[in-house]
Every structure is written in C-alpha cells, then in structure tokens.
Amino acid sequence: MVDRNKILSDLSKFAVDAMSTFSGVKEEIETIVSLRVNKIIKKMNLVKKDEFDALKKMVQKVMMENEKLKKTSSRSAKSKKKTLKKKKTIKKKSKR
C-alpha cells in the first residue's frame, strides 16, 4: 500500500514537472516565432497602421478639395460661356 502511494505521488510530481516544462517550451516557441515574424515584417519594409491612417486622411482631404475645385471651375466655365453668348448677342444687336 505504501509503495502504491509512493508510486502515485511520484507520478503526480512527474506530471506536474512535465506540465511546467511544456509550459516553458510553449513560451519559448512563442517568443522565437514572434521574433522571426517581426524580423520578416521589418525586411518587408511595411508601413505602420497609424502612418497609413494619417496618409489616408490626407488623401481623402485632397480628393475632397479637388472635387470642390472641379465644381467651382465648371461653374466659372459655364458663367464665362453665358457671358460670351451675351456679348455676342449684344454685338449682333448693335450692328443692326
């Protein structure tokens, strides 16, 4: 009976030690994988998310300003055409 309890106690200690060892191995593997992934990302020269978001906002702002300028220029072009038509009409009337 004592031998049986001693064996079970030894087995439980062995299991606990094995679990802590596997836990340490798991952490070590995670660290190694993380370092390698970071190294690969740095080699790829990728842009950070915050830098990308800032650039995206700038591009959107420029696009909106561009659209506003297009609308303004098309309005001014239309008004110039109307002015030219009026001038031509006035010249024709004055020649008569």
Image (cartoon, rainbow, N blue to C red):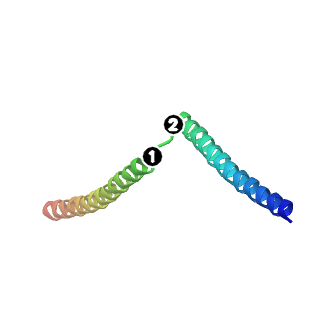
Q: Give the image location of residue 54, x and y in percent.
A: 36, 51
93 and 77: which is toward the camera: 77
Q: Inspect the image, locate mark 1, and give the three-letter code of the amino acid beneath it.
A: Lys
Q: Is residue 18 above or below residue 39?
A: below
Q: Give the image location of residue 66, x and y in percent.
A: 33, 54
Q: From the viewer's perspective, tell me whether residue 31 is left or right of residue 60.
A: right
Residue occupied by mark 1: 48
Mark 1 nearby-residue class (10 Å; few <14, some 14–19, many ≥20): few
Could you tell me which secondary element the residue under label 1 belongs to? Answer: loop
Extreme residue in the top direction: 43
Q: From the viewer's perspective, tell me whether residue 67 is left or right of residue 45.
A: left
Extreme residue in the front direction: 2
Residue occupied by mark 2: 45
Mark 2 nearby-residue class (10 Å; few <14, some 14–19, many ≥20): few
- Numbered circles on residues, count: 2
Looking at the rendering, which quadrant does residue 13 occupy? bottom right
16 and 21: which is toward the camera: 16
Q: Give the image location of residue 91, x and y in percent.
A: 16, 59
Q: Inspect the image, locate mark 2, and give the three-letter code of the amino acid beneath it.
A: Asn
Q: Are marks 1 and 2 in contact (CB under 8 Å)?
A: no
Q: Quadrant of the C terminus?
A: bottom left
Could you tell me which secondary element the residue under label 2 belongs to? Answer: loop
Q: Label 1 vs label 2: CA separation?
A: 9 Å
Q: From the viewer's perspective, tell me whether residue 53 is left or right of residue 29.
A: left
Q: Quadrant of the N terminus?
A: bottom right
- Which mark, residue 21? none
Q: Give the image location of residue 16, x and y in percent.
A: 70, 56
Seen at 26% across and 60% down, the residue is: 72
Q: Is residue 45 above or below residue 54?
A: above
44 and 39: which is toward the camera: 39
